[in-house]
Image: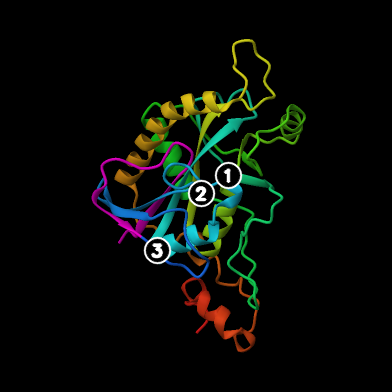
Amino acid sequence: MIGRIGIIGGSGFYDIEGVKDARSIKVTTPFGKPSDDLVTGTLEGKAVVFLARHGKGHSILPSEINYRANIYAMKKLGVEKIISISACGSLKEKMKPLDMVVPDQYVDRTNQARQMTFFGDGIVGHVGFAQPVCGALSKELYTAGRSLGIPVHLGGTYINMEGPQFSTKAESVMYRSWGMDIIAMSNMAEAKLAREAEICFATLACVTDYDCWYSGESVEPVSVDLIIQNLRKNIDNAKKIVRMVLKGTKADNDCACRSALKNAIMTDPKVMPPATKKRLKLIIGKYVE
């Protein structure tokens, strides 16, 4: 049996057409409110849950997103896989505007103490994160894009900047010297929390621009106008890829993502604070009575 598939829509991706029996749900979590109501229904015959990362109308900064509530809400609604859509800038000439990238690594450059773990307050957990995305789900996204004739790159490092400002040219050049491939503002926290929640996670990054390192005469400097213009084109392709993945996705209950917490919880259950234990029951319940 295939569990629900979560779709997190980023900049420009605020809904997805064609969801049957769509129902908007307000989900309560121990970590506060998600970015918006979650929409459940079926798409291409699969049960889906959709969430607009920045809220409908784009009212939440990347630094203000309640990532814990968003991922917890997905878990609460039975999501087993998350496809996260992200607009991004490219730091490599080969990854052109309007291309898609399915990254396999992340580097964190945020600095405003985003909440990126469910643990704390008396319960300690350390999940493995060397391979931060689900390889199987990532390959499904790549294969779907290729089959549709959409330019898509499998693999690459996503550097997660703080924002909301774009990079200085010096920063952009520095990130390139580090070997980074794309740059955006939101996916690191989602990937970490999805791993702790034992949900398969993969990013479909939509290249809107060359950040500000590129000095080609025919390339416009990065701006909101340019990003929005390219986003509209990218989002159509992203939706096509998501639909193609949904058509072919199969249950894979033996995926290592589904047992990420098996040996990760360090705290003796005897000393776990009852309130924290209760708050994390959905996350750790199958390992801690």
Return the x and y of residue 146 as percentages of the image width and height: 41, 31
Task: Answer with mark 2 or mark 1, whichever residue precedes in sequence.
Answer: 1
* SS at badge 3: loop
The tag on residue 207 is none
The tag on residue 27 is 3
The tag on residue 135 is 2
Give the quarter of the figure containing the N terminus.
bottom left
Return the x and y of residue 15 as percentages of the image width and height: 36, 43
Q: Is residue 20 magenta?
A: yes
Q: Is residue 76 left or right of residue 213?
A: left
Residue on which the image places disc 1: 104
Task: Answer with mark 2 or mark 3, whichever residue precedes in sequence.
Answer: 3
Whether tag 2 and tag 1 are in contact, CB under 8 A, the answer is yes
Q: Residue furthest left?
A: 21
What's under tag 1, amino acid-wise? Answer: Asp
Spatial CA span between label 2 and label 1: 8 Å
126 w.r.t. 187: above or below: below
- Residue 86 visible in rendering: yes
Give the residue drawn at x 47%, y 61%.
Answer: 33
161 w.r.t. 49: above or below: above
The part of the chain drawn in magenta is 1-25
Q: Residue furthest top?
A: 217
What's under tag 3, amino acid-wise? Answer: Val
- Image quadrant in which you'd find residue 215: top right
Discs 2/3, front? 3
What's under tag 2, amino acid-wise? Answer: Gly
Q: Residues within 10 Å of mark 2 (few under 14, many from 20)?
A: some
